[in-house]
Structure formats: structure tokens, C-alpha cells
Image: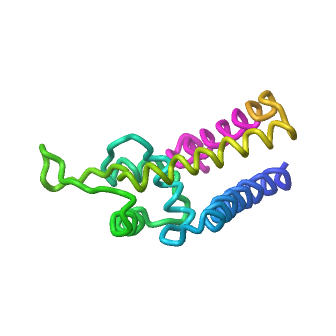
């Protein structure tokens, strides 16, 4: 079981890196060089929402990235707009600019192409099973972090 568990962890890590490579390849194809793959996924996950940096960070989608730094770069490059919250001047809210929305459309097209191609390799049931298994593992790790599984 230890070998299988370790292999799962390594595979999850490799898959994340490989998907970042997929996004980077698409950015290169589109000749977009003022944003990186991690920043692109941050934009895509913000989508039409208006969030604080704290809310974005709490989502936890950004493995190995500094969200504040990336948000600053996205604002500088015109992908995000940052505004002070009207009720709390210490807090800022971010939302996509027109440039950010256009890139999100391109990423959505990439996802759609991927869906069409992956559906030739596996069906929805296989992906659903995979998602359920990964969700179980995520819950296990969350519970572990929250000390539900106490080490004696």
C-alpha cells in the first residue's frame, strides 16, 4: 500500500506540472508572452467573480506560487483590475479586465478542445471515478492537517 500511495502522490504532482506545460504550450501557440501558465490559471479561476486576494489565496489552487506577486504582475500587464473595497479601504478587490476576459475565452477554448480529445481516450464515468478518488484523498489530507488523525 505504501508504494501505491507514494506513486499516487508523485503522479498527482507530475499531472499538475504537465497541465501547466499544456497551458504554457497554448500561450506559446497564441504568442502571448506577458503572462505565465500559473497566472493564466489564476485568471481562469477568477473568471467573472470579484474577489479579494485573501479569498483567492484561500481557494488554494496555486501550488508553488505567490498569489500576491502574481496578482501584482497581472494588474501591471492589464489582465486584472484592482480596486479598493468601498466598505473597507484596507481591502482591495480584483476582477478581470477586458484583456483578462479575452484570455479566459482562449483558455476555455483550450479546455473544450481537451475535453473533445480526452473523451476519445476515456469516458465521463472514468473521470468521475477519478474525481471522486482524488476528492477522497483531498479530504483525508485536510482531515490529517486538521488533526483528526492524531499521531500517537
Residue at the spot 49% in from the left edge and 67% down from the top edge: 35
Q: Is residue 90 above or below residue 131?
A: below
Left-right relation of 45 to 26: left
Between residue 26 and residue 131, name the one nearer to us: 26
Left-right relation of 69 to 5: left
Left-right relation of 108 to 146: right
Picture quadrant where residue 122 is located: top right
Residue at the spot 70% in from the left edge and 36% down from the top edge: 131
Residue 148 position in % (x across, y down): 54, 40
Residue at the spot 73% in from the left edge and 31% down from the top edge: 128
Q: Is residue 65 above or below residue 3?
A: below
How was the colour assigned to the protein in this rendering? rainbow
Residue 14 magenta-highlighted = no
| Dominant SS in magenta | helix
Residue 18 position in % (x across, y down): 72, 61
Residue 109 position in % (x across, y down): 62, 45
Query: In the current view of this chain or complex, which residue is farthest to the bottom?
Result: 33
Q: Is residue 140 above or below residue 92?
A: above
Number of numbered discs? 0
Residue 14 position in % (x across, y down): 74, 61
Extent of the magenta region: 130-152
Residue at the spot 46% in from the left edge and 53% down from the top edge: 43
Amino acid at each position: 500500500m505504501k508504494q501505491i500511495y507514494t506513486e499516487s502522490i508523485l503522479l498527482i504532482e507530475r499531472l499538475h506540472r504537465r497541465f501547466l506545460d499544456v497551458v504554457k504550450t497554448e500561450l506559446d501557440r497564441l504568442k502571448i508572452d506577458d503572462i505565465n501558465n500559473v497566472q493564466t490559471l489564476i485568471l481562469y479561476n477568477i473568471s467573472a467573480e470579484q474577489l479579494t486576494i485573501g479569498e483567492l489565496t484561500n481557494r488554494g489552487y496555486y501550488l508553488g506560487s505567490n498569489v500576491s506577486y502574481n496578482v501584482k504582475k497581472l494588474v501591471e500587464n492589464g489582465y486584472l483590475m484592482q480596486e479598493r473595497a468601498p466598505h473597507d479601504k484596507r481591502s482591495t478587490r480584483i476582477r478581470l479586465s477586458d484583456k483578462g476576459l479575452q484570455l479566459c475565452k482562449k483558455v476555455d477554448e483550450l479546455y473544450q478542445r481537451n475535453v473533445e480529445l480526452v473523451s476519445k481516450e476515456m469516458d465521463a464515468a472514468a473521470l468521475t471515478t477519478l474525481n471522486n478518488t482524488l476528492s477522497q484523498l483531498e479530504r483525508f489530507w485536510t482531515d490529517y492537517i486538521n488533526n483528526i488523525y492524531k499521531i500517537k
